Image (tube, rainbow, N blue to C red):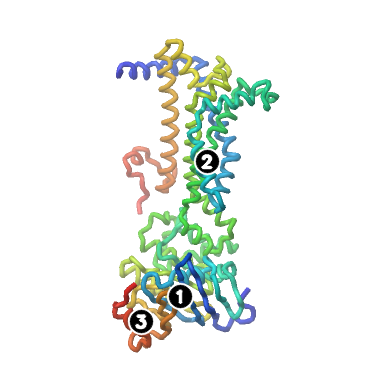
């Protein structure tokens, strides 16, 4: 087992070092659809989360519960539904989104909506009640108080957006059903893995898996590093990476 | 808006039969008071006496179920109270900003110029002995330092009603003393300072007038010497001796 993993790492490095344009194109397409899907989703998810999180209304818990439940929606089920809508006879067939990267991105935008809405609304909902009172007692209007709370939970929003990106980045169902895994056009990392596994190219599939994981981990570490820099009040100029990793990157007081 | 033509007179706050309930619990039963500027009024009472509820109502953070609040003889509501009153909470709350931005928050809302903000912040930090703390992350400061920042933030707004909910609870004696001195230094005819505390010694040191609240009702209003030496109410007598059940 360990040999297989080591070989997969070697194969992954070889794949990247080979300069094969299709490998880079596949990575690019994966980042493109996940990135576009997440950005699109933010357009409606963040405002929706702000409305749900900052307001108290009857049935709020039901709405939050529904979004929480939808976090685990099977991607193949959503992919199938979108396939019916995007196919030539479907309601949105005229948009010609089937077997396109933009079609996958739209599917992923819908997929990640519950993640952004749930996480962000919960963060806003749980924002320290005292911060609301503090803003008010300092003279802030309701609008300004809400802006302050959004600012205070900004980092939770970034984390929810990162989680949404990762969900889109690693999903297979929508990419397969809407994208069709067309070589050179809509093939992304996850569909490449599935395809190479079916074709018996286990080492290539593993290599793509390693690349997929590496990108997710690098993104997560980058976000954590930025959070740390922000929390410790360190500027990039003051950053000594080694010290940050060793937990010594704090400002002297 | 409340001070037209009375800049030289002392501000006053009249509470008329204030009542407040949370579900079935009556937090304030009937509170009637007449408070004047240039005084530090200390609210004493056991836990659950209604001190924090009264402070939150006066800060405009809660509305009353019944009763009237008049500021400078004009009927006022929660929104209008927020324009003249500032509350310093017992549990210090800080925005995720540096000290300067925390202090500037209320001033920016009031559209004070950046230059003036910088000058006033420098003075306010000096008053609470935290000069040079402007760029520190507020949430990273110690409890005592945060409480002093909270006090400076309230001082900066120059509110007519300054409400302090146990501002020295859980602080070391040195920090408590700095805060007490800063509070006493803010006495003015244009300001009513109301401080809730459990600390009888502190009440004796800083109060011009003591109000004893028990079970949502006022049981005694007196000057410190009368309150401690000649309490009229049996409840107050027991409270001073630490014999009051709550």
Chain at numbered mark 2: A
Q: Secondary structure at mark 3?
A: helix
Residue at image x 51%, y 73%?
B19
Foreground residue among A152 and A198? A198
Displayed quadrant of residue A220: top left
Residue A127 got which mark? none
Q: Which mark is residue A66?
A: 2
Q: CA distance from mark 2 to mark 1?
A: 46 Å
The chain that hosts pointer 3 is: B
* Dot 3 and dot 2 residues touching (CB under 8 Å): no
Looking at the image, residue B49 lies above or below residue B117: below
Query: In the depicted view, which residue is nearer to us: B164 or A57?
Result: A57
Q: How many marks?
A: 3
Disc 3: which residue: B235
Let me know if marks 3 and 2 both belong to one chain: no
Mark closer to the chain start, 3 or 1: 1
What is the x, y in percent for residue A97? 64, 24
Residue B42, placed above or below residue A107: below
């Amino acid at each position: 087992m360990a040999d297989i993993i080591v070989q997969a790492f070697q194969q992954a490095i070889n794949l990247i070092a080979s300069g094969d344009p299709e490998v880079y194109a596949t990575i690019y397409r994966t980042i493109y659809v996940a990135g576009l899907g997440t950005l699109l989703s933010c357009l409606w998810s963040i405002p929706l989360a702000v409305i749900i999180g900052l307001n108290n209304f009857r049935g709020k818990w039901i709405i939050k519960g529904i979004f929480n439940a939808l976090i685990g929606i099977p991607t193949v089920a959503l992919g199938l539904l979108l396939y019916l809508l995007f196919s030539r006879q479907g309601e949105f067939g005229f948009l010609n989104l089937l077997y396109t990267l933009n079609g996958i991105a739209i599917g992923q935008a819908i997929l990640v909506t519950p993640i952004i809405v749930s996480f962000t609304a919960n963060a806003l909902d749980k924002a320290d009640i005292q911060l609301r009172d503090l803003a008010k007692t300092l003279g802030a209007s309701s609008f300004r108080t809400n802006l302050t709370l959004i600012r205070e939970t900004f980092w939770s929003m970034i984390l929810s957006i990162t989680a949404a990106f990762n969900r889109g980045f690693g999903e297979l169902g929508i990419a397969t059903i809407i994208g069709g895994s067309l070589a050179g056009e809509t093939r992304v990392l996850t569909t490449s893995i599935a395809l190479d596994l079916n074709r018996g190219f286990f080492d290539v599939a593993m290599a793509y898996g390693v690349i997929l994981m590496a990108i997710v981990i690098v993104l997560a570490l980058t976000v954590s590093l930025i959070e740390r820099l922000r929390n410790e009040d360190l500027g990039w100029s003051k950053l000594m990476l080694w010290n940050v990793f060793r937990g010594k990157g704090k400002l002297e007081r | 808006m409340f001070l037209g033509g009375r800049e030289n007179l002392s501000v006053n706050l009249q509470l008329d039969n204030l009542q407040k309930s949370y579900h079935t619990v009556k937090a304030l039963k009937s509170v009637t008071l007449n408070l004047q500027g240039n005084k530090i009024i200390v609210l004493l009472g056991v836990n659950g006496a209604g001190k924090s509820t009264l402070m939150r109502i006066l800060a405009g953070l809660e509305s009353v179920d019944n009763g009237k609040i008049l500021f400078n003889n004009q009927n006022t509501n929660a929104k209008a109270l927020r324009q003249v009153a500032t509350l310093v909470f017992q549990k210090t709350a800080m925005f995720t900003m540096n000290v300067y931005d925390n202090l500037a928050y209320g001033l920016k809302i009031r559209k004070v110029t950046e230059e003036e903000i910088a000058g006033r912040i420098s003075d306010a930090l000096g008053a609470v002995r935290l000069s040079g703390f402007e760029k520190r992350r507020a949430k990273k400061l110690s409890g005592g330092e945060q409480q002093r920042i909270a006090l400076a933030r309230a001082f900066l707004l120059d509110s007519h009603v300054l409400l302090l909910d146990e501002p020295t609870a859980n602080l070391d004696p040195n920090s408590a003393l700095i805060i007490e001195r800063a509070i006493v230094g803010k006495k003015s005819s244009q300001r009513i300072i109301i401080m809730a505390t459990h600390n009888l010694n502190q009440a004796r040191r800083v109060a011009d007038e003591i109000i004893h609240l028990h079970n949502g009702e006022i049981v005694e209003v007196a000057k410190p010497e009368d309150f401690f030496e000649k309490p009229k109410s049996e409840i107050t007598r027991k409270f001073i001796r630490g014999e009051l059940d709550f």
